[in-house]
Image: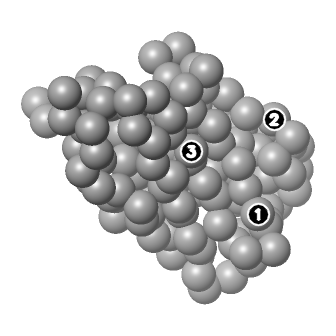
Amino acid sequence: VQLQASGGGLVQAGDSLRLSCGASGRTFSSYAVGWFRQAPGKEREFVAAISWSGSSTDYAGSVKGRFTISRDNGKNTVYLQMNSLQPEDTAVYYCAGHDTCYNGDYYYTLGSSYDVWGQGTLVTVSS
């Protein structure tokens, strides 16, 4: 499966954006998906994750209450709704997938757990 992240852009502090992670190549419904971000000069960090069914999610403390991860398996897409964006949210956002083969409905917060990565989409938040 190939992943493509989209939806990034330049916004002002307090604005919202919705990122999409689209999958192609094969069915996406068995994949757990995570969003990660990397700001200039910083290491990649976990943002949010969702299990294959969508019933389990997790968030980094810095985005909890502001970001929401969701998925539409019928559309082979995972979303990251980002509200109340702040300048510190500026980063390249990546989505990643891990094929669970439906063995357990888990999410994963470590980048090393993922097999497939999208190319990233840039989010810039101005103050």
Frontmost of labels 1 and 2 is 1
Measure the alpha-carbon separation of dots 1 and 3: 13 Å
Residue type at mark 1: give it.
Asp
Q: Position of residue 116 (x, y in %)?
A: 50, 61
Q: Position of residue 54 (x, y in %)?
A: 81, 47
Q: Is residue 1 above or below residue 11?
A: below
SS at circle 3: strand
**Which color mode does the image show?**
one colour
What label does residue 72 carry, if any? 1
* Residue occupying the point 24% across, 27% down: 87
* Residue occupying the point 79% across, 67% down: 73
Label 2 crowd bin: few (<14), some (14–19), many (20+), radius 10 Å? some
SS at circle 2: loop
Frontmost of labels 1 and 3 is 3
Query: Which residue, as the protein is rendered here, is positioned at the far left?
Result: 41
Task: Return the residue nearer the eye: 19 or 126.
Answer: 126
What label does residue 56 carry, if any? 2
Q: Quadrant of residue 40?
A: top left
- The numbered mark, 1 or 2, whose residue comes first in the sequence reads 2
Residue type at mark 3: give it.
Gln
- The numbered mark, 3 or 2, whose residue comes first in the sequence reads 2
- Kindly indicate whether the residue at mark 2 contacts the one at mark 1 (C-beta within 8 angstroms): no
Question: Which residue carries the number 3 mark?
Answer: 81
